[in-house]
Image (cartoon, grey):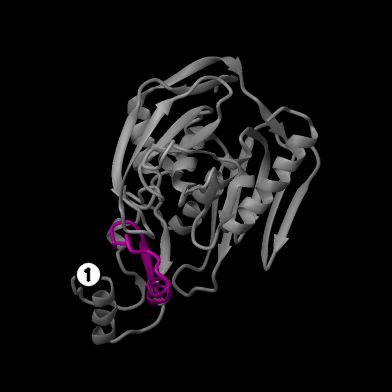
């Protein structure tokens, strides 16, 4: 990959529903000049406020990564940012006419396809890298994220939810070339036992069996299963016992771990720079990811990179 910055050649637009808000939204990617970085622009609000996609603008991480600046928010940015970062794009304007990005199929696949169709353009300025020289470790409540020196970006994710269905899983990304085929298509996932709680908390209004893998760990009666479907205004389906409810949408056996790596990459994009280093994450989540990135942001500022 070239060491020159990159943007897209043409604009690209997608329409979809926000995972948590359930609101239809249009998102448009536009080319940006060198050293712009990643900028969200809320075109539905007065004066079209802009939000820099940087870790210091993160205000919420309970179920997704939410950014806030200039009295405007944009939620669930991780799949969008993962696609942009995974495609090697350095500068882009992301216009959006609502408070949350569209969930689409629950992965970054459709974002990647849209950006690829728009075309990638090499720019004149050199890329800026944050090179990890000393080990960086963040630990919180059983989550450990560690970074060490390496000559390119390498990611390894380990998850263990003590699940009889998922078991322990591992996902690795050693080359950005593999991102499009090995990571981008991996859907988000949720345990069936969590669904009712999330709905009662006014979340996942845009959730559907086509945009999230649903993990079923306990035995339900058909009646109970139908009751949960009614909560989501979904049609009744035959209950087949423990496992992945919508297995037909699953691409990889370790898809949950791969999706966690997808999320991690999206949150790492909030450094605002390319990273050279090996990062290993055990039980990562948006809170830990973004706190880890805040450590990197602090180091970037200390190095007086003017970023």
Q: At which x and y percent is residue 82?
A: 49, 42
Q: Is residue 132 among the parts visible in the rendering?
A: no
Magenta-drawn stretch contains 197: yes
Q: In the shown orientation, is residue 204 left or right of residue 257?
A: left
Q: Which one is nearer the viewer's eye here, 228 or 61? A: 61
Q: Name the residue rendered at 56%, 21% in the picture.
A: 5
Compared to 34, does 94 lie above or below? Answer: below
Q: Which residue is mark 1?
A: 234
Q: Residues within 10 Å of mark 1 (few under 14, many from 20)?
A: few
The single residue placed furthest to the top in the displayed view is 124
- Residue at horizontal 21 percent and vertical 76 percent from the top: 238
Image height of 250 relative to 297, above or below: below
Of 125 and 110, nearer the camera is: 125
Magenta highlight range: 194-216
Q: Return the x and y of residue 206 as percentages of the image width and height.
A: 32, 60
Quarter of the image where the C terminus is located? top right
Give the structural element (helix, strand or loop) at label 1: loop
- Expressed as whole percent of the image width and height from the top left, the position of residue 294 reads 68, 47
């Amino acid at each position: 990959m070239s060491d020159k910055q990159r943007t897209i050649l043409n604009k690209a637009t997608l329409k979809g529903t926000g995972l948590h808000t359930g609101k239809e939204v249009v998102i448009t990617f536009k080319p940006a000049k060198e050293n712009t970085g990643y900028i969200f622009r809320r075109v539905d609000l007065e004066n079209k406020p802009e939000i820099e996609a940087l870790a210091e603008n993160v205000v919420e991480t309970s179920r997704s990564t939410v950014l806030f600046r200039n009295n405007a928010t944009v939620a669930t940015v991780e799949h969008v940012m993962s696609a942009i970062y995974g495609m090697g794009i350095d500068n882009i304007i992301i216009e959006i006419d609502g408070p949350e990005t569209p969930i689409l199929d629950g992965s970054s696949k459709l974002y990647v396809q849209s950006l690829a169709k728009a075309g990638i353009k090499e720019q004149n300025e050199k890329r800026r890298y944050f090179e990890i020289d000393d080990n960086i470790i963040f630990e919180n409540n059983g989550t450990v994220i560690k970074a060490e020196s390496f000559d390119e970006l390498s990611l390894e994710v380990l998850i263990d939810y003590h699940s009889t269905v998922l078991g322990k899983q591992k996902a690795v990304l050693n080359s950005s070339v593999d991102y499009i085929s090995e990571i981008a298509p991996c859907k988000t996932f949720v345990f069936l036992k969590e669904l009712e709680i999330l709905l009662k908390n006014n979340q996942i209004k845009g959730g559907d069996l086509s945009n999230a893998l649903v993990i079923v760990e306990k035995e339900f009666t058909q009646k109970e299963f139908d009751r949960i479907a009614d909560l989501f205004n979904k049609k009744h389906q035959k209950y087949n016992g423990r496992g992945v409810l919508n297995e037909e949408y699953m691409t990889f056996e370790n898809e949950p771990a791969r999706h966690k790596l997808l999320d991690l990459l999206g949150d790492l994009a909030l450094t605002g720079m390319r990273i050279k280093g090996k990062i290993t994450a055990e039980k990562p989540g948006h809170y830990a990811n973004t706190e880890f990135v805040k450590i990197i942001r602090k180091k970037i500022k200390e190095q007086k990179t003017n970023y």
